Image (cartoon, rainbow, N blue to C red):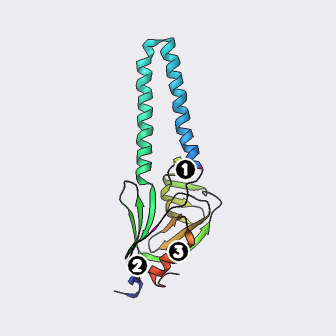
Amino acid sequence: MTEPERVCMAAEEKFALAPADPETTVALLVLTVPLGVLSLVGVAVGISDPAELPGFLAFLGGVVLVIVLLVAVLFAFTPTAYILDAQRIRIARRFARPVLVPYARVRRIALRQFPGPPNIVWLGSYPLRGFFGYFGWFRVERLGWIRVYATSWDGEMVVLETDREPYFLSPAEPQKFCEALRARLCGTAA
């Protein structure tokens, strides 16, 4: 085993994610209020012209199905915990396979503060910003492409620079997470 691959601890440590951004509530409202309005319109249509009701109910059912599928996919890929095990950082997700970042790839660990989600180009969960969390590829101005597995942009975020790409994480206790990660890396990352 080469020096950068050496790991000092074997027991797993699990770290909770930061509380979700308030945008989650807004996203839920953005999804539920239009459905409520559509339902009221459907009732009005059904009362005024009962012949039109089946077509409207089919349309409403299609809209509900698309929204339920979108929410299910977003829910499945949402990060749920950061786990430091003997050889890697494991980013647990609800129903999708975990994301694995081997310690040997970590080059630098830093804490960074953002005033909120930066102006970003999305390849992840951005359209429903904060709905269950942020995950996927993002392009951040002046930083380039990053992989985000976070629930919040409030407070400090942990930035892991690897030999491939940087990762942004939002543990509930970022200082404690960084200390535990540095201890596992045994001084091989800055």
Q: Residue furthest left?
A: 1
The amino acid marked with disc number 2 is Ala
Q: Which residue is mark 1?
A: 129
Q: Assign a secondary structure to mark 2.
A: helix
Q: Is residue 13 magenta?
A: yes
The amino acid marked with disc number 3 is Cys
Q: Which mark is residue 178?
A: 3
Please give the range of residues in magenta: 12-22
Answer left or right for 189 relative to 69: right
Cα–Cα span, label 2 and label 3: 16 Å
Q: Residue 141, position in %: x, y?
A: 60, 62
Q: Residue 113, position in %: x, y?
A: 63, 66
Tell me the residue at 55%/48% (across/down): 24
Q: Is residue 115 magenta?
A: no
Circle 3 residues within 10 Å: few <14, some 14–19, many ≥20: some
In this rendering, the answer to whether 167 lies above or below 129 is: below
Sequence-first tag of 3 and 1: 1
